[in-house]
Image (tube, grey):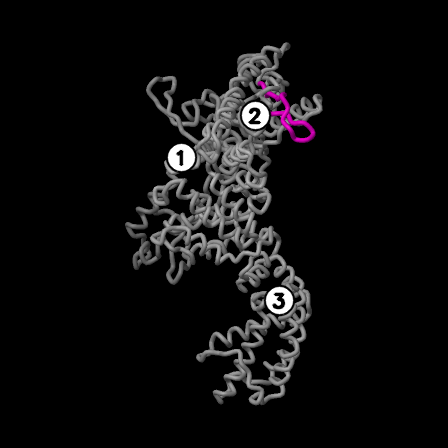
């Protein structure tokens, strides 16, 4: 009889890669539980707990059966005509099939006949014995390990000196407990038991004998000095960081990725307060923060104004009675890093940004697109064109100078050491060179927005250079066929496109997108590929996705985008107008009528001019529609030209009654060609009047 108990599986290994630990732990727990569920050992939605520390991956699953229930199975064998002879006796083919399944001719009378498509087939009913926990767990562990998102596999030898295995790190222990009983499974040359190890230095005993599956986390904490759960350990670190910072009246820098990485480096976190010499604060704080976070995994402390202080927090993996040696060691280690940053900063300022620009001609940007120097000239060309449209004069001058200098910091020592600071350091060096703040901001901001939700560039010059930089990137790479496919986007062109869209829409820039694409391609040599239509379509697709994420429905977005507004800055107002129009009682009927009109005009064999001869308006219904149009269309047009898109659409509500009457009482495709052309012209006029703000046919259900 099957019994249900909780299950604990732990793989004890050498230190795992910290940046991958969180995903490794989640994957191991999820896939092992999925394997047990697929074999009928756990409920459909089992309670699963994941554990991951630098030296262990573990999972606790509740209510795991010792064996799965038996299942009735109906197995198709073959068509009756193949399995049975004319006299009803089994054919050799059927006997061979039965033998392969462990049956013989005695079961032939029990075989079922069922229609399978157009012919009858033979089916064998049997009972499949449910998997035992040992067999199911063996399969589940192997599958879970095979699916681990291992960043880099290593090969190592087992204790026998001959056998080699591949895994993320050498594994030294395996625990598998069903309740208090050991499940006899093996993996990576290890036999399952109930013994694990705690903290490398601070465990109470060298080995921990686990009582049962449910005592795992508590025994590791009490006897092993280890917080096994990743989430629990992370929360403990965050609490300690906040408490230590609050004691100094400061706050730790917020960085989820750093917190995850530090959580993956320690098993028994202990936050300690350290400091460095205040003279280093003369270096831009971005440099100091980056070197402390990236190289040392420290948490810099900021004051209430967000300014860096000379104190920082360290998350130690040990808790000595006297932490002074740990604190002193970390303070000694950070000094050379900060000194390097100060040296780079001092050396870089000995040369102006402008003096570095010629050196960009020696830096390859792309083997098909030339050097960074050539790229800078293209960005300058695009920037001057955009600035000329947005402001001219001083803006053109500032944008051109910022575009010329924007990539110069790539040749500085600081950016060479910390590529993440490109743009940021350019701004500092521009200020040191005495350049206006507008140019410094533009140099720093021209990479923005760098990710979803990032802030947009400050100031007009920053917007111009950021637009030019993204347009040059998109036009250049589309022109040589480097187009994103599927989930592959090595040059982050989707991100560049989204940044371009956000600036146009959120800053309400009076720029024609099609003209921007044309300007970008014209900055390249005539021999450069002219993939303008392809890039325009790509931008349109990204625009649709962006608008959907802002909360508008697919129907609303399609209606506005299909109207192809030249200025994407108008799109939010158009969307708001469409949403307001949809609330009108006349909206649905007008949308349906608009769709019908569009279909009629598309199907017309003759070219349709939006011209109406009033003398040929024979029917009262078409006369009424024409008169309504003469009244409504000019008012709607005036509202549209004044930017009142909501008012422009709502005026169209007056057309519902004459439109309905027209379709009820008028034959559009009259036999008389002149009459037919006149009616099509009337519909063309109405279609044009109705679709200025949006393609209302897209709102039809």
How far is mark 1 from mark 3, CA to CA? Answer: 50 Å
How far is mark 3 from mark 2, CA to CA? Answer: 53 Å
Q: Which residue is mark 1?
A: 359
Counting residues from the start of the chain, the first of labels 1 and 3 encountered is 1
In magenta stretch: residue 131: no
Q: What residue lies at 60% left-to-right and 28% top-to-bottom?
A: 234
The C terminus appears in which quarter of the rendering? bottom right
What crowding class fits label 3: few (fewer than 14 Cα within 10 Å), some (14-19), or many (20 or more)?
A: few
Identify which residue, 663 or 537, lies in the foreground. 537
Query: Please, what is the dominant secondary structure of the magenta stretch?
Result: strand
Q: Which residue is mark 2?
A: 283
Region of the chain picked out in magenta, as a range = 297-316
Q: Which quadrant would residue 416 be assigned to in this image?
A: top left
In magenta stretch: residue 309: yes
Q: What residue lies at 59% left-to-right and 10% top-to-bottom?
A: 325
Marks 1 and 2: in contact by CB < 8 Å? no
Q: Which quadrant would residue 439 be assigned to in this image?
A: top right
Residue 132 visible at all = no
The N terminus appears in which quarter of the rendering? top right
Task: Choose mark 1 or mark 3, whichever is in front.
Answer: 1
How far is mark 2 from mark 1, CA to CA? Answer: 25 Å
Q: Which residue is mark 3?
A: 641
Counting residues from the start of the chain, the first of labels 3 and 2 encountered is 2
Q: Left or right: where does residue 64 sit relative to residue 112?
A: right
């Amino acid at each position: 009889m099957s019994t249900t108990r909780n299950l604990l599986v732990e793989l004890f290994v050498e230190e795992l890669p910290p940046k991958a630990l969180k995903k490794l732990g989640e994957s191991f727990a999820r896939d092992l539980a999925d394997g047990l569920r697929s074999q009928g050992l756990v409920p459909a939605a089992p309670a699963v707990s994941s554990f991951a520390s630098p030296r262990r991956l573990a999972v606790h699953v509740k209510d795991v059966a010792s064996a799965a229930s038996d299942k009735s199975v109906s197995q198709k064998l073959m068509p009756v005509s193949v399995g049975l002879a004319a006299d009803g006796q089994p054919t050799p083919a059927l006997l061979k099939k039965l033998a392969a399944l462990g049956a013989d001719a005695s079961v032939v009378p029990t075989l079922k006949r069922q229609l399978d498509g157009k012919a009858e087939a033979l089916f064998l009913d049997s009972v499949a014995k449910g998997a035992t926990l040992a067999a199911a767990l063996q399969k589940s562990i192997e599958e879970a390990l095979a699916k681990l998102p291992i960043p880099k596999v290593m090969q190592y030898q087992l204790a026998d000196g001959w056998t080699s295995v591949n895994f993320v790190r050498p594994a030294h222990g395996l625990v598998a407990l069903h309740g208090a009983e050991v499940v006899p499974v093996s993996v990576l040359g290890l036999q399952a038991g109930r013994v694990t190890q705690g903290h490398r230095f601070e465990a109470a005993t060298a080995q921990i004998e686990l009582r049962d599956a449910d005592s795992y986390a508590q025994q590791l904490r009490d006897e092993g000095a280890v917080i096994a759960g990743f989430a629990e350990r992370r929360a403990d670190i965050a609490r300690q960081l906040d408490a230590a910072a609050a004691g100094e009246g400061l706050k730790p820098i917020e960085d989820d990725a750093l917190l995850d990485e530090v959580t993956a480096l320690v098993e028994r976190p202990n936050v300690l307060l350290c400091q460095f010499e205040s003279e280093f604060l003369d270096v831009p704080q971005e440099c100091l923060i980056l070197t402390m976070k990236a190289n040392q995994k420290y948490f810099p402390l900021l004051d209430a104004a967000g300014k860096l202080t000379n104190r920082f927090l360290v998350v130690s993996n040990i808790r000595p009675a006297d932490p002074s040696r740990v604190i002193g060691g970390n303070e000694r280690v950070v000094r050379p890093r900060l000194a390097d940053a100060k040296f780079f900063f001092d050396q870089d300022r000995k040369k102006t940004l402008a003096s570095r620009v010629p050196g960009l001609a020696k830096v390859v940007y792309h083997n098909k697109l030339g050097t960074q120097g050539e790229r800078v000239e293209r960005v300058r060309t695009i920037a001057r064109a955009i600035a000329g449209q947005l402001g001219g004069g001083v803006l053109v001058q500032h944008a051109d100078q910022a575009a010329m200098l924007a990539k110069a910091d790539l040749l500085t020592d600081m950016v060479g050491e910390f590529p993440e600071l490109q743009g940021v350091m350019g701004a500092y060096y521009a200020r040191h060179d005495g350049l206006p703040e507008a140019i410094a901001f533009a140099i720093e901001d021209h990479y923005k927005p760098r990710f979803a939700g990032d802030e947009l560039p400050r100031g007009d010059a920053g917007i111009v250079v950021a637009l030019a930089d993204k347009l040059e990137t998109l036009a250049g790479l589309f022109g040589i066929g480097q187009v994103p496919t599927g989930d592959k986007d090595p040059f982050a062109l989707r991100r560049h496109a989204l940044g371009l869209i956000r600036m146009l829409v959120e800053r309400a820039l009076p720029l024609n997108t099609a003209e921007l694409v044309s300007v970008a391609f014209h900055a390249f040599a005539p021999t450069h590929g002219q993939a303008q239509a392809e890039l325009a379509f790509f931008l349109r697709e990204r625009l649709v996705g962006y608008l959907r994420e802002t909360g508008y429905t697919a129907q609303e977005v399609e209606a506005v985008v299909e109207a192809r507004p030249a200025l994407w800055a108008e799109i939010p107002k158009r969307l708001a107008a469409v949403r307001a129009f949809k609330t009108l009682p006349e909206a649905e009927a007008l949308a349906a009528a608009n769709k019908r009109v569009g279909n009629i005009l598309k199907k017309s064999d003759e070219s349709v001019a939006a011209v109406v001869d009033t003398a040929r308006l024979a029917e009262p219904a078409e006369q009424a529609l024409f008169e309504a149009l003469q009244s409504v269309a000019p008012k709607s047009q005036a509202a549209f030209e004044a930017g009142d898109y909501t008012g422009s659409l709502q005026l169209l509500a007056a057309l519902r009654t004459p439109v309905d009457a027209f379709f009820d009482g008028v034959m559009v495709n009259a036999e008389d060609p002149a009459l037919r052309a006149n009616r099509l012209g009337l519909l063309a006029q109405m279609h044009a009047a109705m679709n200025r703000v949006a393609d209302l046919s897209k709102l039809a259900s």
